[in-house]
């Protein structure tokens, strides 16, 4: 099973993303779906930026 997933990893991920997008479009509508996608991308960008400057390192406690 793991080998099958590794072989078809990107088609499976793309299919799941398409399914989620279709469900969002049907349930909440086009513009709300675009807003959800925009805010998700914005949040991921901010998270990557904060991680790259080491912002989260200040919250780690040293192990005693």
Image (cartoon, helix red, strand yellow):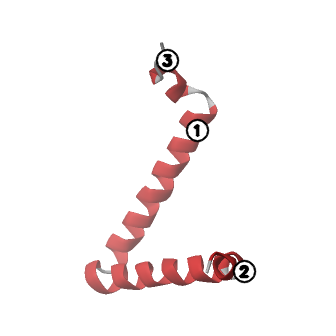
Residue 4, given in percent of the width and then of the height, sits at 67, 82
- Residue occupying the point 63% across, 75% down: 2
3D distance between C-alphas at marks 3 and 1: 26 Å
Is 21 rendered above or below residue 58?
Answer: below
Q: Which mark is residue 49?
A: 1
- In the rendered structure, are the residues bearing label 1 and label 2 in contact, judged by CB atoms less than 8 Å apart? no
- Residue occupying the point 38% across, 65% down: 35
Reading the image, the residue beneath label 2 is: 7
Helix, strand or loop at mark 3: loop
* CA neighbours of label 3 inside 10 A, class few (<14), some (14 to 19), many (20+): few
Mark 1 and mark 2 lie on one chain; the one further toward the N terminus is 2
Q: Quadrant of residue 21?
A: bottom left
Mark 3 and mark 1 lie on one chain; the one further toward the N terminus is 1
Mark 3 and mark 2 lie on one chain; the one further toward the N terminus is 2
Reading the image, the residue beneath label 3 is: 63
Residue 20, given in percent of the width and then of the height, sits at 42, 78
């Amino acid at each position: 099973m793991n080998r099958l997933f590794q072989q078809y990893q990107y088609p499976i991920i793309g299919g799941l993303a398409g399914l989620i997008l279709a469900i969002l479009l049907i349930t909440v509508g086009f513009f709300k779906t675009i807003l959800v996608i925009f805010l998700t991308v914005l949040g991921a960008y901010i998270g990557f930026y904060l991680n790259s400057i080491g912002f989260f390192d200040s919250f780690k406690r040293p192990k005693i």
